[in-house]
């Protein structure tokens, strides 16, 4: 047998790919999380993970158990929501892609709550995969994330934006509306490690035989932007990231865009509706999105 906290530990490891990051996600120490996983494996009499120095991989039994674990937690989440619906205020569990600017998310939340004073928003920030998993598991109601062409989940498009090169406002190229990648040869670069087009960007520079000097790598986009403004280096970013001291440049051949969309939880059993999600959906669709908002 197993307990729900063990399933949450298990899914946290799957989503983060690391026992250390999983422990941070569920707010326990790494030894506590490791002990919980060990008890889960002992109770199931199978090994769920193969561990190496840097990576954690699901075993074949772990892959089979993953879908069941998600279903169990999703059903428990629905049961808890149904039990407490009458006693608690309306709660919207909102997931937001971590590469959506914080200012944009803050404005959306502020304006929605100003119109719906009785609603409490529980905010979860994560990667594209983490948001999809939480929707499937019923742990969030709606997600604002990247829309891919191969998605089968129904989604509502919110806005589309370009990726641009962000350089310090005092940079020698800052006044040029469009630059060539060769002009960035040997320039210091900041890498946003959670960027959705990180591999495409790397390939773009490699194909052009341009290898900038890596000076900083970060998962936090606002911090990357602050370091660009400080003159540490340049980076590629969605154009919705605006800040004093930053110039945005188009780069020849670098024609990548992304579409941000709103995705909802899976259909509820027996045709149950979620009026709060409907209200948020309608508000988000009518919201003034986009880089210039």
Image: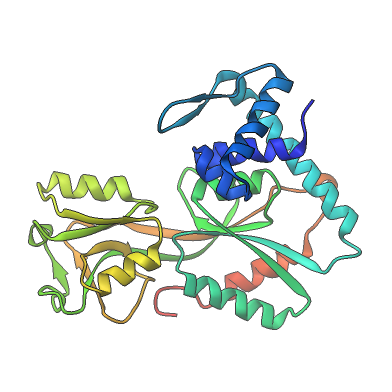
Residue 210 seen in the current view:
yes
Say which of 157 and 290 sits in front: 290
Residue 140, image x, y percentages = 67, 54
Viewport quadrant of the N terminus: top right
Q: Nearest the camera: 59 or 99? A: 59
Q: Residue at x 67, y 41 (%)?
A: 8
Point out residue 168 in the picture as x, y percentages from the top left corner.
21, 74
Where's residue 88, x and y in %?
85, 66
Total numbered badges shown on the rendered structure = 0
How are the colours assigned in the image? rainbow
Picture quadrant of residue 85: bottom right
Locate residue 46 relative to residue 185 in the image: left or right.
right
Of the pair 193 and 129, the residue shown nearer to us: 193
> What's the residue at 78%, 64% (across, down)?
275
Instruction: Name which residue lies at 58% across and 70% down.
Output: 285
Image side of residue 91 versus residue 13, left or right: right
- Which quadrant of the figure contains the C terminus? bottom left
State the residue at coordinates (16%, 45%). Answer: 206
Residue 233 rendering spot, x and y as whole percentages: 20, 65
């Amino acid at each position: 047998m197993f307990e729900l906290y063990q399933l949450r530990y298990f899914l946290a490891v799957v989503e983060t790919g690391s026992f250390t990051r999983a422990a941070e996600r569920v707010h326990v120490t790494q030894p506590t999380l490791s002990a919980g996983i060990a008890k889960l494996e002992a109770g199931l009499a199978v090994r769920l993970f193969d561990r190496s120095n840097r990576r954690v991989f699901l075993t074949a039994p772990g892959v089979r158990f993953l879908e069941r674990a998600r279903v169990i937690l999703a059903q428990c989440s629905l049961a808890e929501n149904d039990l407490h619906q009458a006693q608690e205020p309306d709660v919207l569990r909102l997931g937001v892609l971590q590469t959506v600017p914080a200012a944009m998310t803050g404005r959306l939340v502020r304006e929605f709550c100003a119109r719906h004073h009785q609603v409490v928003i529980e905010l979860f920030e994560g990667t594209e995969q983490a948001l999809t998993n939480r929707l499937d598991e019923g742990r969030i109601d709606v997600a604002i994330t990247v829309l891919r062409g191969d998605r089968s989940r129904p989604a509502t498009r919110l806005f589309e934006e370009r990726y641009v090169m962000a350089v310090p406002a005092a940079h020698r190229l800052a006044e040029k509306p469009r630059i060539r990648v060769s002009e960035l040869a040997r320039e210091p670069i900041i890498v946003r490690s959670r960027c959705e087009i990180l591999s495409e960007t790397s390939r773009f520079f490699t194909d052009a035989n341009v290898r900038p000097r890596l000076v900083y790598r970060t998962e936090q986009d606002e911090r990357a932007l602050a370091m660009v403004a400080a003159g540490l280096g340049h980076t590629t970013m969605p154009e919705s990231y605006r800040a004093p001291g930053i110039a945005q440049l188009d780069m020849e051949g670098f024609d990548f865009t992304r579409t941000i969309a709103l995705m909802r939880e899976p259909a509820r059993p027996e045709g149950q509706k979620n009026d709060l999600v409907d209200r948020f959906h309608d508000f988000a669709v009518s919201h003034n999105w986009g880089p210039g908002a």
